[in-house]
Image (spheres, rainbow, N blue to C red):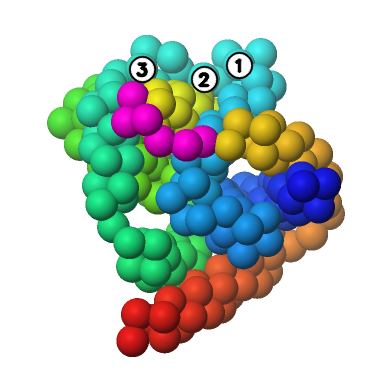
Amino acid sequence: MTFTYLFALLSGLLSGGALGLTGGGGSILAVPLLVYLVGENIHLAIGTSLVAVGVTSLISSVSYMRQSLVKFKIAFFMAAPGLVSTYLGALINKQIKGPVLLLIFALLMIYIGYMMTSKKAPERKETAGSSSINYPRILTLGFITGLASGFFGIGGGFMLVPALFLGANLKMKEAIATSLFIIFIFGMFGLASYLIQGREINLAISAVFVIGGSVGGIIGAFYAKRLDQVLLRRIFSIFIILIGLAVFAENLIKLL
């Protein structure tokens, strides 16, 4: 049991460190680390990850709140559809066998890794009406991200930040800050979904993971200022793709 908590702490350090170093993508490591390092089954790992990533995001967003960069009105508006979609995502993953779920998760890892290698800063044209909010886009992306959060146990910042930047016309720092708060909301929706469905969540492991993630995030952010961000993102994206391929191959063999 002691080793389980040590591995949970290490998992948090790795996930938080990756998040701090790259500014995004670290939460995608939470589930595979919980499965392969801590030893949780995939369904439990997703629930644990939802809570851990949500609380870690809240902690990360506090400094942004002090700078008034979190736009709460837009955050709650975008998160509103997630009240339903996060529950649906958690309900759907309950029906899928572990190896199949890991196969799908591996494909998501490969996709996110690829997106990070080719990622460019989103662009928008500044016009007289640029202060308007694209409500259909915000609601649609909120629903999709909530579904992904409930199904995969991830934060979904890779979808939220561009949606907030382009759809809500926030500045990039505001989009990042607001997305962190939305991820926290989705995490709480996910926790409620699991509890309503009578499913297990290891809150003790989540708490230890959050401690590791907070420390890892601070360390990662410290070194991020001293390292080449473009190179870091490329290395991390390749790392994610390789893990995704390994997870995919292992579970494909199990199914065959």
Task: Say which residue label 1 marks.
Answer: 65
Task: Say which residue label 3 marks.
Answer: 76
- Residue furthest toward the left? 136
Who is closer to the viewer here, 116 or 142?
Answer: 142
**Which x, y percent locates residue 74?**
35, 19
| Mark 2 neighbour class, 10 Å CA radius: few under 14, some 14 to 19, many 20 or more | many
Badge 3 marks a residue whose secondary structure is helix
Task: Say which residue label 2 marks.
Answer: 70
- The magenta span reads 196-201
**Which x, y percent locates residue 168?**
32, 28
How many marks can you see? 3
**Which x, y percent locates residue 133?**
25, 24
Q: Is residue 43 left or right of residue 217?
A: left
Q: In this view, does 111 lie to the left or right of 66?
A: left
Q: What residue type is labelled 1?
A: Met
Q: In this view, does 137 lie to the left or right of 50?
A: left
Residue 92 seen in this snapshot:
yes
Residue at 79% of width from left, 59% of height from top? 227
Confirm or deny contact between disc 1 and disc 2 (CB under 8 A): yes
| Mark 3 neighbour class, 10 Å CA radius: few under 14, some 14 to 19, many 20 or more | some
- Please check the rendered image and state whether residue 198 is part of the magenta-colored stretch, yes or no: yes
- In this rendering, the label closer to the viewer, 1 or 3: 3
**Which x, y percent locates residue 7?**
76, 53
Residue at 51% of width from left, 36% of height from top? 201
Q: In this view, does 63 lie to the left or right of 176?
A: right
Numbered mark located on residue 83 in the image: none
Q: Which amino acid does label 2 sit on?
A: Val
